[in-house]
Image: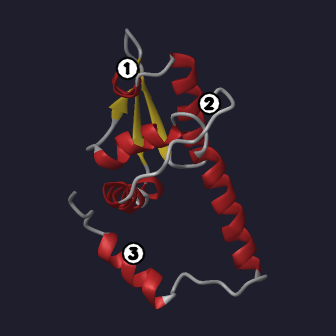
Amino acid sequence: MVEPPHAEKLIEAILSNETARPPGSERAEKDNQTMATLLNLLGKKHTIVILHQFATGDGALRFSDLEKAVDIAPNTLSNRLEELTGVGLLTRKAYNEIPPRVEYSATEKARDLAPVFWYLGVWTERHDLEPIATADD
């Protein structure tokens, strides 16, 4: 797996503790809210798969390309794209054409998540998880 170009800077920031906030500070509270919002969004079905398409791709993607790549229902994809656009991870550009064309692009916020996907990929190469037991088991 190839390391993303800005992963080294992220590692340096984490190790130097530049991003740490004093517990209970106003900034720490805002960071906690942002983290909770991000994790809630990422926990929704297909969100990570959609973001991964942008994190690993080059440039804008059309709705139809995403629909094929992630193999999900159009209404679910539409909802996730609306949510990701709403929080500023994607931008949406509609073209005044027939048939209509809409493209989505990753914002800098979304591109900054690329190292996260890289690290998750490295982690999955190194570790396995036991399947989660369900009530049917």
Of circles 1 and 2, the one toward us is: 2
Three-letter code for the amino acid on which mark 2 is drawn: Asp
Residue 43 rendering spot, x and y as whole percentages? 60, 44
Residue visible at 55% across and 49% down in the picture: 88
Determine whether 81 is above or below 111 in the image: above
Residue 15 rendering spot, x and y as whole percentages? 44, 86
Q: Is residue 86 left or right of residue 9?
A: right
Task: Look at the numbered disc 2 and give the secondary structure of its residue.
Answer: loop
Residue 106 rendering spot, x and y as whole percentages? 41, 46
Q: Earlier in the sequence, mark 3 or mark 2?
A: 3
Task: Look at the numbered disc 1 and give the secondary structure of its residue.
Answer: helix
User: How far apart, in angstroms, are the residues tagged by discs 1 and 2?
Assistant: 37 Å
Residue designated by label 3: 10
Residue designated by label 2: 137
Determine whether 8 is above or below 83 in the image: below
Residue 16 rendering spot, x and y as whole percentages? 45, 90
Determine whether 44 is above or below 108 in the image: above
**Could you classify mark 2 by the number of other residues whose Cα lies within 10 Å: few (under 14), some (14-19), or many (20 or more)?**
few
Callout 3–callout 2 Cβ contact below 8 Å: no
Residue visible at 70% across and 77% down in the picture: 27
Residue visible at 57% across and 42% down in the picture: 132
Residue designated by label 1: 64
Q: Earlier in the sequence, mark 3 or mark 1?
A: 3
